[in-house]
Image: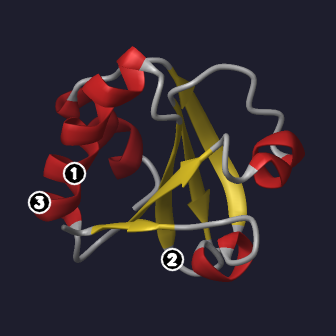
Amino acid sequence: MAVNVTTDQSFEQDTAKGLVLIDFWATWCGPCRMQSPVVENLSETMADQVSFFKLDVDQNPDTAKKFQIMSIPTLMIKKDGEVVDKVIGYHSKEQLQKVLEQYM
């Protein structure tokens, strides 16, 4: 699996370099469970260009609060440590790939 897990403690270090997609999710969230395989599939095809992380908002509320994550799934894109985009709700592999390609 090319999707890594990040936490409140490791988030800044994990997402500080390069192009990164972070999937903010929770175990009880139906749309999050639909989004997960899409992110995993995308991580396999784009692993050489993008780092992929998941952050469970229930277990890591500080990071979710810091970035004002109000709805999940939220997919945040960071480039070299700066937030460059945020998409909320379920998105297809093609939609996410198009968003990521803007920042390559």
**Mark 1 → mark 2, Cα distance in angstroms:** 18 Å
Residues at circles 1 and 3 in contact by the CB criterion of under 8 Å: no
Indicate the amino acid at tag 1. Glu
Specify the color scheme.
secondary structure
Decide which of tag 3 and tag 2 comes sooner along the chain.
Answer: 2
Q: In this view, does 99 lie to the left or right of 16?
A: left
Residue 85 image position (x, y, % from top left): 61, 41
Residue indicated by mark 2:
18
Q: Residue sitting at 23 percent across and 25 percent down? A: 92
Where residue 65 sits, quadrant-wise, is: top right
Indicate the amino acid at tag 2. Gly
- The dot on residue 40 is 1
Secondary structure beneath dot 2 equals loop
Residue indicated by mark 3:
45
Taking 69 as reference, is 59 above or below it?
below
Residues at circles 3 and 2 in contact by the CB criterion of under 8 Å: no
Secondary structure beneath dot 1 equals helix
Indicate the amino acid at tag 3. Thr
Using a 10 Å C-alpha cutoff, classify the residue at mark 1 as few (fewer than 14 neighbours), some (14 to 19) or many (20 or more). many
Secondary structure beneath dot 3 equals helix
Q: Can residue 11 be seen in this view?
A: yes
Residue 59 image position (x, y, % from top left): 67, 51
